[in-house]
Image (tube, grey):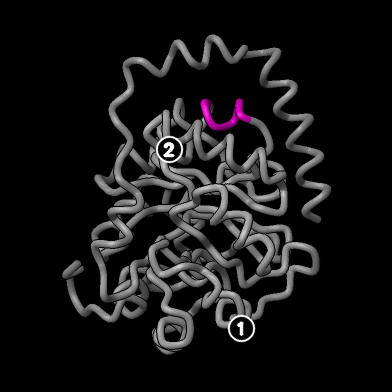
Amino acid sequence: MLKEIAAHKWREVGRKKKAYPLEEVIRGLSDLPAPRDFKGALLKCSPGVAVIAEIKKASPSGGALVSPLAREKGPAEIAALYAEAGAAAISVLTEERYFAGSPADLAVARSAVGIPVLRKDFIVDEYQLYESRAMGADAVLLISSLLAAVELQRFLRLLAELGMSALVEVGKKEEIEQAVHAGAEIIGINNRNLHTLEIDLERTVRWGPFVPRNRVLVSESGIHCREQVAYLQKMSGINAVLVGKSLMESGDPGKKIRELTGVHGSCAC
C-alpha cells in the first residue's frame, strides 16, 4: 500500500508543478504569518503526555469513517472542539485519494484555532514542503521509509529555513538512527505497519528506548484509552500521542481527549 500511495504522490506532484510552478508558490509565502511552535506545544504538557488530535475522514484500511462527528461537523468545528478540550496540536489529513482529505481542510482548521497544525500526507518532494507552508501548515509529517537519508536531511534543513517543524515517522531501529543523524527533533513511532496495516502498540515499546531523551517522542496509531497512554509513557517515555480514529468515532471527542491527557475539564498544560 505504501509503495502504491508514494507512486501516486509522485504523479500528483508532477501535475501540480505544471499547473502551479514552484516559483509561484514561493512568491506567495512572503505575506504569511509565522508558523506556530509545534515542538514547544508538545513539550508544554510535560511531564504529562500531549495529544495531537487528528482530523480524518477515511483510511485505506477502514474506508470512510461513519460517525456523527465526521458526518455533521466540518474541519473548523472539529479543530475548535479539539483545541477547547486540551489538544496540544491538530493533525489534518490532506491526502485526497486514499484518505478523503484536502488542503482546504487544513486551512480552515488552522484558522479556527490558536494551536499548531500538522499536515499529514505523504511527502516525497521538496515542492510539497513549500506547498505545506503555503496552505498554512506549521509542521509536516515526514515518513522515513519514503526518503533516502540525504533527502531527509535536506527536507529538515528546508523546513527549518521555512520556520516549520517536522514529525519524522519511523518504524524500526535503522530508521530511528537515520532520523537522529539527520537532525530530527520530533520522532514518531507508528504502531501501524505501513505494509501490512496491522497495529501493535509494542512497536513503540520496542523502539522507543532507542530515541534519545533530548528528542520529542510521539506514539502514533491504535491508541484508544488512558491506560494505553500511561503504559506507553512508562515503558518508552513518550511525550505525545497522535490520535485520530478513536476521536473521530467517539460520541464525545472532547471527553476522550481529556481522558487521554489525564486532565478533567480544561487542559492544565
Q: Residue at x 37, y 33 (%)?
A: 163
Tag 2 secondary structure = loop
- Rate crowding at label 1 as few (under 14), some (14 to 19) or many (20 or more) other CA atoms within 10 Å: few
Q: Which residues are magenta?
A: 126-130
Residue marked by disc 1: 202
Query: In the image, what residue type sits under mark 2?
Result: Ala
- Towards the viewer: 230 or 235: 235
Query: In the image, what residue type sits under mark 1?
Result: Glu
Q: Which mark is residue 55?
A: none
Q: Residue at x 73, y 74 (%)?
A: 198
Query: Whole-Å distance between the Cαs marked 1 and 2?
Result: 30 Å
Tell me the quarter of the image containing the N terminus. Answer: bottom right
Q: Residue at x 52, y 77 (%)?
A: 209
Compared to residue 59, the image places residue 133 above or below, namely above
- Towards the viewer: 174 or 230: 174
Q: Quadrant of residue 257?
A: bottom left
Asked if residue 128 lies in the magenta stretch, the reply is yes
Where residue 161 appears, as percent x and y from the top left, is 42, 29
Asked if residue 231 lies in the magenta stretch, the reply is no
Q: Which mark is residue 137?
A: 2
Where residue 266 appears, as percent x and y from the top left, is 17, 69
Tell me the quarter of the image containing the C terminus. Answer: bottom left
Relative side of 195 to 157, left or right: right
The chief SS type of the magenta part is: helix
